[in-house]
Amino acid sequence: MSDITRLHTPLTNEDVTALRAGDRVLLSGVIYTGRDAAHKRLFELLQKGKPLPVDLRGQVIYYVGPTPAKPGRVIGSAGPTTSGRMDAYAPALIAHGLKGMIGKGLRTQAVRDAMMEHKAVYFGATGGAAALISRCIKKAEVVAYDDLGPEAIHRLEVEDFPLIVVDDAHGADLYSEGVKAYER
Amino acid sequence: MREIHASTITDAVADLCMTANYALGDDVYQALKAGVADEESPVGREVFAQLIENADIAREERVPMCQDTGFAVVFVELGQDVQITGGLLSDAINAGVAKGYTEGYMRKSIVGHPLDRKNTGNNTPAVIHTEIVPGDKLRITVAPKGGGSENMSGVRMLKPSDGVEGVKRFVVETVKAAGSNPCPPIIVGVGIGGTMEKAAYLAKKALLRRVGERNANPPDAALEDELLRLVNDTGIGPAGLGGRITALAVNVETHPCHIASLPVAVNIQCHAARHKEVML
């Protein structure tokens, strides 16, 4: 197992290109949530050449729709959702300057090509570890699309969010490599 | 006739929705513990350890173990000597789901129409499966089902000549295509026989079985063991990062079928295998 890299958002091209599939990362700083419905809206704005409600250049999107916060808590349970549903929209956001994505599950070649061309990274968080992950989230507020409820875009402040680099900016994919090692 | 009031059902369902989402069943919890010991992949062992810690936090703090608190799938076994008073069974169940998901700080994940996709705001309606059984009792099982694993499930109408080999191929193919998406380690429900919808129903129902419990029919139990080995040989592993344990269990249920047919359904369940039941 590799050593753990500590990273702080926003991410630079240098941060991104230094990462390799399989690297462990503890991510801190501001990240943004977004899933199906928010992505559709962001994509449509980009297509029309209109400004986004949040500046995503250099930023990281976490594919998550959290549960409502219990009284006195920052946020509810907040584990990753399946990234593949955002694949239709992700290349446009990456071309726009998005540097990182956090989710779970396979990405299409089109997304991985965009990551190589524009220098972006795809992190995996442990699917289903939602109560555990929520402890890394220190602050949460809705910054766009409040009408979408759990799908609204939240600005999160995270501290040492444990991640693993699944797809790097050089074309490597941890899922296929990891599975190959144990396939019989 | 024994009478059960609708409000009793509503309260029971609300409680089941919350308990199911907060407290992972002991059978699944023990299977995760075994995974820490048995998994060969170091990353995989770490995933198991995270899932155990996650289950502990959720149970102790009464918070959802997963942010996807699921579609409320409700199995009802209604004794034919029971009369429900004070309202309709389905209304009583849906009121319980709304209450449980709202008061329990759970995510509302249901849209009212699959194409216009407007959130109903209280996680209703539930999917309700009702069976009439002998007796004067009412058994209700609430099984919240996450979207990520449900999306990777499938049904195929095989030819009878495809036989058991065809069934195995379809199960393994479905698990392989799912890869890391459905949050492995998974539980695989397999419904074989009946009609298309019966096979799908059996696959879902197979997920309610306790981890480690085998099908009572020895040939079907042997098929379960073989399917578990084949699924684990895919190497997908915990969180799909590669490893020996892709599934905690494969549960097979069968039903008589048409001379022309061999329907097979595979329902994939993530490791947050939630179901709680009550007998009223």
Image (cartoon, helix red, strand yellow):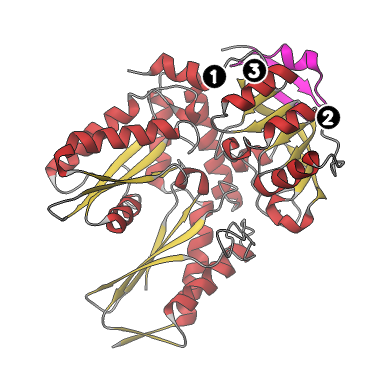
What amino acid type is highlighted by mark number 1? Leu
Q: Is residue B23 above or below residue B28?
A: below
Residues at circles 2 and 1 in contact by the CB criterion of under 8 Å: no
Sequence-first disc among 2 and 3: 2
Q: Magenta region: which residues?
A: A3-28
Q: What residue is shown at x 68% (from left), y 23% (from top)? A: A114
Secondary structure of the residue carrying numbered label 1: helix
**Is residue B45 shown to the viewer in this render?**
yes
Q: Which element carries disc 2, helix, strand or loop?
A: loop
The answer to which of B280 and B109 lies nearer the viewer is: B109
| Front disc: 2 or 1 | 2
Looking at the image, which residue is at 73% across and 32% down?
A92
Q: Residues within 10 Å of mark 3 (few under 14, many from 20)?
A: many
Tell me if I can see residue B213 in this picture: no
Residue closest to the eye, A144 or B224: A144
Residue B62 badge? none
Q: Gap in Å between the C-alphas at discs 2 and 1? A: 25 Å
Residue for badge 1:
A174
Asked if residue B62 is positioned above or below residue A173 in the image, the reply reads: below
Q: Is label 2 in contact with label 3 (beta carbons under 8 Å)?
A: no
Name the residue that disc number 2 marks.
Answer: A57
| Residues at marks 2 and 3, CA–CA distance in whole angstroms | 18 Å
Q: CA distance from mark 3 to mark 1?
A: 9 Å
- Residue B97 in picture, x, y percent from top left: 53, 67
Q: Which residue is mark 3?
A: A168
